[in-house]
Amino acid sequence: MGTTLRVCCRIVFHLPKPYAAMIPFDVLFLFTAASAALAITPGPDNLFVLTQSALYGRKAGLLITLGLCTGLLVHTSAVALGIAVILHKSAVAFNALKMIGAGYLLYLAWQAFRAGAVDPAAQKSGPMGGWALYARGILMNVTNPKVAIFFLAFLPQFTDPGRGLIPLQIVLLGAVFMICTLVVFGGIAWAAGHIGQWLSNSRRVQVVLHRAAGSIFMLLAGRLAFSRQ
């Protein structure tokens, strides 16, 4: 067993030059800074985390954040495998995926507008189970073709054929981007959940938060529906 482990470690950490994917520190630092800045910039995903955390608490926001980061794994794999090129080149594929995403956002808006005030004790567990919240985050991220197109344009800028396999570099950069997103979105979930817990004592405030969330979902759905490649 020990011998097998040592052999595997040699294979992973001592790959021949054509298969290595070492990213210089200065490039990695620049990429990390850019990724953190992009995660902080208001967009559909962090607004989604903000509203859901304010409504249902930090736990719900963190579970959705984990789902969104899982969606980033899907987009990273799509870029590494070249699948994202299809969305970039095919108007049919792009429009089909964005309409699915817009429809899902409208469904969330409908749910938010229908929701009323709930008992604070029941609210702590969130509107649904943990796996459902996690799946909601995945679906929210994966059905946004703009993320795939963004990754297709953004990640390759920090790669270099001289450093080894491009797909492996893409995977490493995607992992860094995911970690930055997890940290930033986790902070948003914690802060919004804390504020939401304070506001949840007022039934009127709960209704206002639901209406605000529904309005945001509608705006995001319209933005996605009318977006272009």
Image (cartoon, rainbow, N blue to C red):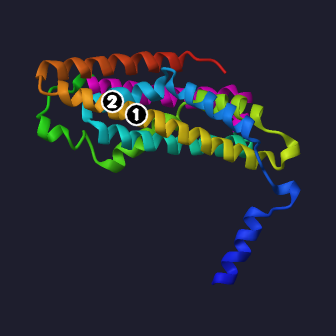
> Would you say the residues marked 1 and 2 are in contact, meaning their CB atoms lie under 8 Å apart?
yes
Range of the magenta residues?
Answer: 84-112
Residue 64 place in picture, x, y as percent: 39, 40
Q: Which secondary structure type mostly characterizes the magenta part of the structure? A: helix
Label 2 CA crowd tier, 10 Å (few <14, some 14–19, many 20+): some
Q: Quadrant of residue 169?
A: top right
Q: Is residue 40 left or right of residue 196?
A: right
Label 1 CA crowd tier, 10 Å (few <14, some 14–19, many 20+): some
Name the residue tied to disc 2. 191
Up-down: is 56 above or below 128? above
Picture residue at 73% right of the left edge, 40% below the top = 25
Q: Nearer the viewer, residue 12 or 90?
A: 12
Picture residue at 22% right of the left edge, 25% below the top = 114
Q: Is residue 29 left or right of residue 43?
A: right
Q: Furthest-front residue in view?
A: 25
Q: Quadrant of the C terminus?
A: top right
Residue 211 place in picture, x, y as percent: 26, 18
Q: Nearer the viewer, residue 148 or 205?
A: 205
Name the residue tied to disc 1. 187
- Answer whether residue 188 is magenta in the image: no
Up-down: is 187 above or below 21? above
Q: Nearer the viewer, residue 78 or 61?
A: 61
Q: Quadrant of residue 147?
A: top right
User: Which residue type carries mark 1?
Assistant: Gly
Q: How far apart are the two marked residues, 1 and 2, measured between alpha carbons?
A: 6 Å
Can residue 163 be seen here? The reply is: yes
Q: Is residue 67 left or right of residue 74?
A: left
Residue 79 place in picture, x, y as percent: 70, 40
